[in-house]
Image (spheres, grey):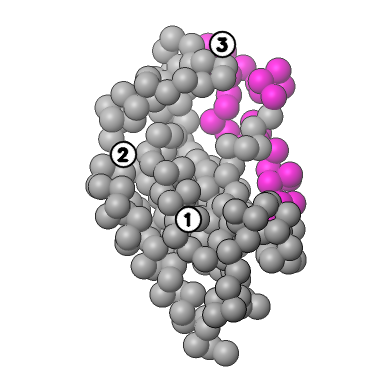
Amino acid sequence: MKTLVFGVGGVTNGGKSTLSKSLHKQIPNSCLIAQDEYFKDDSVVPVDSNGFKQYDMLDAIYMDTMMREVESWQKDPGAFLRQRGPEHNTVSAEEEKVYVLIVEGFLIFNHRPLNELFYKRYFMEIPYDVCKRRRSLRVYTPPDPPGYFDGHVWPMYLKNRQQMESMVSGIVFLDGLRPKEELLAAVCRDVCQEMERLREDD
């Protein structure tokens, strides 16, 4: 049995979730873990001097819990897939030796213990105006207060990205304005090539 861990990060509403879910459907023996599933309750997320909830930082996420999930997959990816339900159990005789974990999230490359696990890193980026427009069309719980994007979301994205680039190398930046099918084909090709390389190493 061999394993590969890939990361799909990027700006809010940049298309990382769409890409990750599509990859999961395309790649046999794959599993998807999304960082958004580990947000802390709104009541414990700190507030800045402007009254904005500080969601766009690692302290707002149960990273220890997320890491335990990743470690559980590493120990026995087959059992991990079975626990997630039959729709995830896509093991075939031909491909049973390579399992793929796709980790998706906006701060996955800023958490050093998680970042060190990635064989390859993809980062979705879109321009400010597109990001702001897409964000305004989404419904969040709790909802974004007035001025939240310019007062917190975008400044924190720039800050987190600068930190990421100072500590991480080898990131593949993806243009989130390109057609979804084109992005999926390119990344899927990369992943499948690495899976084939591992099989040939036997």
Q: Amino acid at mark 1?
A: Lys
Residue 147 visible in the picture: yes
Mark 3 nearby-residue class (10 Å; few <14, some 14–19, many ≥20): few
Please give the residue where the numbered disc 1 appears in the rendered image. 25
Horizontal and vertical percent for residue 123? 41, 50
Q: Residue at x 43, y 34 (%)?
A: 12
Q: Residue furthest front?
A: 86
Please give the residue where the numbered disc 3 appears in the rendered image. 51
Q: Nearer the viewer, residue 83 or 161?
A: 83
Q: Along the horizontal axis of the image, is 48 left or right of 125?
A: right
Residue 66 covered by magenta stretch: yes
Q: Residue at x 60, y 53 (%)?
A: 87
User: Secondary structure beneath disc 1?
Assistant: helix
- Does 56 sit above or below residue 185? above
Q: Residue at x 68, y 46 (%)?
A: 66
Part of the protein shown in magenta: 41-70
User: Secondary structure beneath disc 3?
Assistant: loop
Q: Amino acid at mark 2?
A: Ile
**Residue 126's disc number:** 2
Q: State the CA–CA distance, disc 2 to disc 1.
A: 24 Å
Q: State the CA–CA distance, disc 2 to disc 3.
A: 27 Å
Of labels 2 and 3, the one closer to you: 2
Mark closer to the chain start, 2 or 1: 1
Q: Nearer the viewer, residue 132 or 31?
A: 31
Q: Residue at x 59, y 42 (%)?
A: 35
- Does 176 sit above or below residue 134? below
Image quadrant assignment for residue 5: bottom right
User: Secondary structure beneath disc 2?
Assistant: loop
Q: Nearer the viewer, residue 19 or 163?
A: 19
Mark closer to the chain start, 2 or 3: 3
Mark closer to the chain start, 1 or 3: 1
Q: Along the horizontal axis of the image, is 138 left or right of 56?
A: left
